[in-house]
Amino acid sequence: MSVRAIVLAAGRGTRMKSDVPKVLHEAAGRPLVGWVVDAVAQVRPDEVVVVVGHGADEVRALLPAGVRTVVQEERLGTGHAVMTALAEMGDVSGDTLLVVPGDSPLLRGDSLAALVEAHGDADATLLTAEMDDPTGYGRVVRDERGRVGAVVEERDADAAQRRIREVAVSTYAFAGASLAEALRRIGRDNTQREYYLTDVVGILAAEGSVGAVTGAAAADVQGVNSHDQLAAVAAEMRRRINLGLMSDGVWMQDPDRVYVDAGVRVAAGARLYPGVHLEGATTVAASAVVGPEVFATDSDIGPGARVWYSVLRGASVGAGAEVGPYASLRPGSVLHDGAKAGTFVETKNTVVGPRSKVPHLSYMGDAEIGEDSNIGAGSITCNYDGYRKHRTTIGDRVFIGSDTMLVAPVAIGDDAYTGAGSTITRDVPAGALGVERSHQKELKGYAARRAAREAAEEAEEA
């Protein structure tokens, strides 16, 4: 018997007050529906169908290859969403249908696999959880023998039913033929005027066999309908990620204050201090020390590198290189092995060669710096002429004096120097000293003349 999965992802998420489709809100760097599809994939279904609605094109664009979508044009409840899917899926009579919500990113693949295995030949099998606060969930109503008799949505539950702590979490395994038949019999006689998928449970329980896989952890089945729930889910996802990293040998001083997205790779032996945010396709190599207070996205941090109190965006930091404190490495920044971008340094589209240093208070944009060179404090590549960007080339073993303005396009040859306070507009040959300064003048008696002038003006005003 084949297994086919249906992911319900058509909801708008009105409580989130956002134009972003609910299932595209992110937890730990991945859309909610992306986490769900990943969990479903662990069951190895023969087909995955995602029911989309609000923002259908946006949701479809972010789904992995091979996932099929169907559009629920008129959103009339979860039962209607499944009807929409079945209308496009053809004959399901010989299939087990796994139905999961697209807004429950903490669902684990092994839980879904256990649900499918437990289902066997039943008409329906529910995944349920015990919750101290079951607000918002459908209650699982059992008979005197403990058999599942129905699932009652909270809006339609009476006082006694609302006290039930066992809840359905919108995750089911159905016999395809049984589900299709039951869906034809449900109506909209409820407070929402919607087709409830939960009504199928009552029909099948009365006429067939309904089982339940109980004891799912409340955290694993948390759905997202508001920003506070999104924050709670994201926190749990980060906790899982950090636990996995630490078990693999990554040191964290305070894991509650380390934020690592799903796509990030951190090698064993790396050290992460509090306030570290690693996003996108960032990688951190063994023995690298990152933090405190680092934001890095789509960046690579090499072995033994030290990055602290800094921002990296699309940057590459080589082995043993140092970044910070208070450095900003913008896209295209490359620090080779042993290089340094120090205190209050900004780089953009710039390569800093092996062992070269930009120690402090400098901007290097659209530049190529060779090896073993030193950039003095307050130096700037003047790379923009108001119309286009130009490059600066600095050779090997170059010493750029403090407060040098390098007006691009310009090249500084190997072993060359520039004098402090110079504005360099022409190439400096290898081994030469480039100096651009006006002669200093001293105006003797200036202070006294200035004081006399001020006194005279004050007397005149009086």
Image (spheres, rainbow, N blue to C red):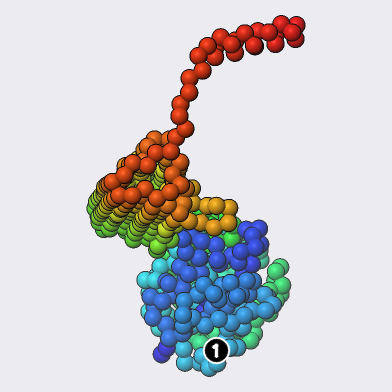
Horizontal placement of 322 versus 275: left or right? left
Residue 214: image x %, image y %? 43, 68
Quadrant of the frame with the N terminus: bottom left
Nearer to the camera, 332 or 395: 395
Residue depicted at 67% across the width and 79% down the height? 73
Nearer to the camera, 169 or 63: 63
Nearer to the camera, 306 or 447: 447
For the image shown, how many numbered marks are present on the structure?
Answer: 1
Q: Residues within 10 Å of mark 1 (few under 14, many from 20)?
A: some
Horizontal placement of 273 versus 195: left or right? left
Residue depicted at 43% across the width and 72% down the height? 38
Residue depicted at 40% across the width and 68% down the height? 108
Kindly identify the amino acid type of the residue bearing the numbered disc 1.
Met
Residue 378 shows up from this direction: no
Residue 412: image x %, image y %? 36, 49
Q: Which element is circle 1 on?
A: helix
Is 271 above or below relative to 314? above
Location of mark 1 (residue): 89
Residue depicted at 51% across the width and 87% down the height? 176
Residue 284 shows up from this direction: yes
